[in-house]
Image (cartoon, rainbow, N blue to C red):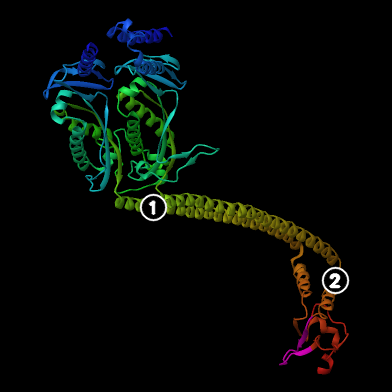
Amino acid sequence: MSRPNEHLAALFKVVRGGNGSDSPPRRSGPGGVRPDLPLGLIGLGIVALILLWGALSSFYTVQPEERAVVKRFGAVIATADPGLHFKLPFGVDKVQLVKTERVLKQEFGFRTQNVEGDRTEYSQEDHPDESLMLSGDLNIIDVEWVVQYRIADPMKFLYHQRNPEGTLRDISESVMRRAVGNRLGSDVLTTARVEISNSVRDEIQEAMEKYDNGIRVVTVELQDVVPPAAVQPAFNEVNESRQERERMINEATKQANQEIPRAKGEANRLIAEAEGYAIERVNQARGETVRFSSILAEYRASPEVTRTRMYLETLNQVLPKVGAVYVIQNGQTGPIPLLNMHQATPTVVAEEAR
Amino acid sequence: MRTTILLVVSALILLLLRNSLFVVDQAEQAILVQFGEPVGSVITDPGLHWKKPFIQDVRRFDKRVLPWDGDVSQVPTLGREFVLVDTTARWRISNPLQFLRSVRDEQGARTRLDDIIDSVVRDIISGTSLEEIVRSKDWKVDLKSLEEELITRQDVALEKPKKGRELLEQEMREAASKLMPELGIELVDVRIRRINYIDSVRAQVETRMISERQSIAERFRAEGQGRSSELLGEMSRELRTITSEAERKAAEIRGKADAEATKIYGEAFGADAEFYAFFRTLESYSTMGANTTLMLGADAEFFRYLESTRRRPAGGR
């Protein structure tokens, strides 16, 4: 407080002294200057205005997110932290405020239009000049990105480079194109994103340090990285066909999964059937042989009778069932129908025919 | 009267001060010029400085790194593609005296820079293939990702560039810097800001990219079909294996059973072969049905007693 006050007081004295020196105090008294009173008032007013200007221009405020660079006669004499500060008035000391704490942002390929409300709105306008670039395999890629930075050193920011933010913009574009140009388009679209944003950040930072312009790059974030609009459907087609490939493979697998277990079941059925047949066949054989053996035992007791009995019994069984029986006489040409089972009343005609 | 003189004197003093004191800004350097001729050394310290009033003039020059932005120019590369090249450069006034003599001011410098850098950029770009300009010296191809997509491009070699972008930019700077000392300028760097195809080439490249993608898509589809056929073939093989093995096993089982049955039959029937023939024949007679026509000889055993009931020998006819 004391310094500017002293200064003002000195100034006031100089102004007063100047007035006093060009005419003795007695003459400026009530004597001859009486009619000049309005002039004195004007003088006083001017002095007051000068005082006011001096008072107003002798302090400045630095906001929390800012730093001040103080220049005296063009030369930087200090930088100041947030708070209230004093300086030489009347434009001797000039103050430039730089927002050092705020993270600033540059957008490439798109523009944020409105950040008020709950959702950030982006301008519909495209900036193909900024975002279209060539990949290493000479394909075209549309890359949108953001560079976030801070002004770390306000003095350097103001006095080491003209328009450092424009330079940041130029360098960002150049470096991003180099990074994308150094990779295959397919990598840029997929796996290399993180790598690119890190290497671009480091490279921009390196350039800024070379210019020593006080900018510190906080981060580089890739936004939309896409093929150019005209090619996008073809890229989608690739994705679709990849899905289609999976689908076809899945369908074939599904069919195999359906049919093979069924075939296995079928195979088991075949085998089981064969086993059933085997059991049946053996059992049949056993049964038949047992029957035969027992009949054989009976037959051996009285072979002649048994033979005849069996023969006649069989004919007895058979004859009613057969369609027709013909009897052939030795030396006779036509056969004689003996029985005709298809006639309404079966008649024994053998005797009559004879 | 004295007041007037004092006023005049102080006004003169003020005028004198105004003409002999000058401020050099932090961002500036200055040269004093006397009758058009630079005098003294370059003032680089910012602050208040003195000069001879009225006869000396102050010329101020920026001390900082200054931007230069080139026009977008259309240049053919070595491969005859036309590309749009946008370059940017940074420079500073390194020798204000020389600068003052040769180009006077920044505007003059800018036109000279335009001429020099533009022509250097054109020279270098048109003598270099596009790959060289786009890629950098640490270019490496991830062959794995190439295999994944199987891009076979005839028009682009995937080798490492001989120079690469940084070296080209460096060459540009060096070539342009040759002429800089006589302008009093130091070129800090020259960079390719943007490089892109001209519109007509761009359309072609996009068409090429589309067909490339389509061929990849086609390959995926064919792969799907191939894999599907393979799977179905494997399935068919497995099905046949399963079925035929089952059939073989079944036949084996049946065969064994038949063999066993035959053995059983053989053992039992072998006891009296003649009786078995008789027995079995009678059995097969009993299977005759309605659509059978039976022919019997008149002297058959069956009719023996139809003619007479006389005793006859049982076995004879």
- Tag 1 near tag 2, CB within 8 Å: no
Q: Quadrant of residue A213?
A: top left
Marks 1, 2 in one chain: no
Q: Quadrant of residue B305?
A: bottom right
Q: Residue furthest right?
A: B309
Point 42% across, 52% down: residue? A234
Q: Is residue B179 visible?
A: no
- Does residue A341 appear to the left or right of A189 in the view shown? right
State the residue in front, A203 or B146. Answer: A203
Point 40% across, 53% down: residue? B215
> Where is residue A26 drawn, in percent x and y?
33, 5
The kind of residue on which mark 1 rests is Ile
> Where is residue A275 drawn, in percent x and y?
71, 55
Point 41% across, 30% down: residue? A198
- Does residue A131 appear to the left or right of A300 in the view shown? left
- Indicate the chain on which mark 1 is placed: B
| Residue, disc 1 | B210
> Where is residue B131 drawn, in percent x and y?
28, 41
Specify the quadrant that holds the C terminus of chain B: bottom right
State the residue in front, A257 or B92. Answer: B92
| Residue, disc 2 | A306
Q: Quadrant of residue A154?
A: top left
Q: Which residues are magenta?
A: A322-337
- Does residue B20 appear to the left or right of B283 in the view shown? left
Q: Secondary structure at mark 1?
A: helix
State the residue in front, A186 or B150. Answer: A186
- Indicate the chain on which mark 2 is placed: A
